[in-house]
Image: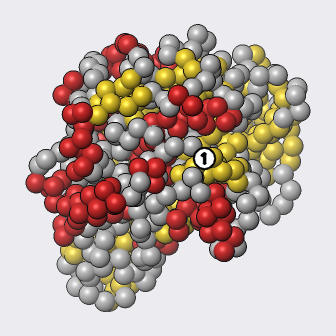
Amino acid sequence: MFRSFKTFYFRTHSKSCLYFMKNFFLAVAVFVALPIFSQILPHYATAVERSQMPDYVVPLSMESDRTSAEFFNPPTTPVRTMAEWEESQGYLIAWTSYPAMLREIVRYGKQECRMYVLTNNAASVISDLQSNGIDTAQVSFLNLPFNSVWSRDYGQWCVYTNEVDSLLFIDWIYNRNRPKDDTVPVGLANYLNVPVYHTTQGNNKLVNTGGNFMCDGQGTGFASKLILTDNLTSAGFGVNHTEAEIDTIMKNFMGIDRYIKMETLPYDDIHHIDMHLKLLNEETLMVGQYPPGTADGPQIEANLQYVLSHYHSVFGTPYKVVRIPMPPDNGQYPPSNFANYYTYTNASFINKTIIVPTYGIPEDSTALRIWREACPGYKVVGINSSSSIPSLGALHCITKEIGVSDPLLIIHQQLSDTYNTATPYAVKAKIEHRSGIQSATLYYTTDTTQAYHSIPMTAIGNDRWQGEIPAQMVGTEVFYYIQAQAHSGKQQVRPIVAPLGFFHFKVLGTTGISEVAENEQIEVIFPNPSKGMTCLPVKTERASAIAITCINVLGKTVQQIFKGTTLPGENKFFLNTSTFAAGVYFIRYSIEERQYTRRLVVR
């Protein structure tokens, strides 16, 4: 069976060309000079690859990699694609470009699971790791053919039959003419003895790329509209699908019931959503934010508002939003002066660790703080990604999770802040394992320096369990997590980092017009003093009209930071002070009819 690739969709407008030119000559040079199994290939299609597309044909897999456990029709039982924050047995990387980044991924990843390293020279990789103080415990070396480092894009996708039963791999047609990359899912499936299902034949053909897909583990997928253009005849992959046909393939092979597609961005030429968007859990989106009117900021905001106005989380509630800065490169943003596309959303969950790209700039500390606040209990590690970002990719682009073979799945919607001080707080969860659930326990505390109280949960039918936290007084913050044990003996907690990480909610005072303002929190500006990207957190208990303005000591407006409507909960806004003169400024918050002012010092 063969896949035919003729041309690769490439944006030729002037802005894209300017962006690509800074890496053009290097990409061509390494493509010609290096053997195909270990090229330093960028994330985007090189000029040479584009020129070869009309005659490009790649076999589905090398004959030596064929397996009887390959299938070309959808699984016969319903499937569920795992979310990235679920438990992984391993992580896949390809040891070629950016070894300094790869070794740090191994350093931290091997503490959480087994690292699978694609390489044709294991001895060299072992020597590199050991010389940097990294042993090879929990590291496996796979001598499989591959072309590039971008394992997120060509790697396998993990799905489970009947929610939590058997682990399967799904293999798409990779949207690059890199034939050996496209065979990696088969080689890994053989190594791990996992069946692999291909979207490569007949009406099931689907061209896709991993950086342009993320899901909530409950049937909702997100992508840019690159998925539509890649599957048109004009893209040159020998595929022509309507959007409905694409949705059907994703439903049949991956259990995606809602496939949310957003407009592509003007300056992110690869159009992968992981460059500016990250799902933190089933109901929380981390979204990259530029200064108003800058770079891809307007389109990112338009896409976010489209999602918020048309879709709710799987729990039927509005998505929560955590904003994180898209930092400048030497004060510039794409496409100005060939600025790199710096991003902090291109991060990876590796069980209890989150690796976040950093760039050796002041904004790194702000981004890491936002990640730690958004994901309490996780070990959040910054890895310098300055070497890879010129090729339009960072950490998420070069890592790929491998789900466990027997997941114990706990799905729970965090309790919201409440005014209830009289009755217990019901904690409900869907809990599943293929052997069945033997017991579930709810743990809670009002002081994380003290021990948690345990409450047995009760099965209430349809894999649902419930426990109740006793009513608390006004002003209390409650921290809690869920633990379950399967009949097989397997145990799991949610969040996966519990008890260091937790769900939490606050018990508020009674409602009333005079008290609404008290429930608005203008939180601490950081960093302060500032010189660069500065975070302005605001928390409201309901959607509120808000305007945020920076003024100087004379009361004159320096910059309008935001004007619009907040979502309930915490909202983060950003001000770039890198061009401000040193001195004292004030941030004025107008929320509904109330005003607050906070002092900001610029170094």
Locate residue 152, reporting x and y percent. 48, 44
Q: Residue at x 69, y 50 (%)?
A: 140
In the image, taking residue 113 as reference, residue 103 lies left or right, namely left
| Spot occupied by residue 485 in the image (x, y as percentages of width and height) | 85, 33
Colour scheme of the rendered structure: secondary structure
Relative to residue 394, is residue 174 depicted above or below? above
Q: Is residue 457 found left or right of 122 in the rendered image?
A: right
Q: What is the x, y in percent for residue 562?
A: 28, 59
Q: Is residue 245 above or below residue 349?
A: above
Say which quadrant the N terminus sits in: top left
Circle 1 is placed at which residue position?
Answer: 143
Res. 468 image quadrant: top right
Tell me the quarter of the picture where residue 482 sits.
Answer: top right
The kind of secondary structure element at disc 1 is loop
**Quadrant of the rendered structure where residue 54 is?**
top left
**Disc 1 packing (10 Å; few <14; some 14–19; many ≥20):** few
Q: Judge from the rendering whether residue 14 lies leftward or rightward of residue 31; answer left or right.
A: left
Residue at the (75%, 16%) spot, across then down: 461
Q: Is any atom of residue 124 visible in this view?
A: yes
Residue drawn at (41%, 69%) of the image: 386
Q: In this view of the protein, which residue sits in the foreground, 73 or 356?
A: 73
Residue nearest the observer in this picture, 331 or 75: 75
As displayed, is residue 72 above or below residue 328? above
Q: Quadrant of the C terminus?
A: bottom left
Q: Amino acid at mark 1?
A: Asn
Residue 410 position, x and y percent, is 70, 33
Labels in figure, total = 1
Residue 344 in sight from this viewpoint: no
Rendered residue at 72%/32% (across/down): 405
Q: Residue furthest top?
A: 76
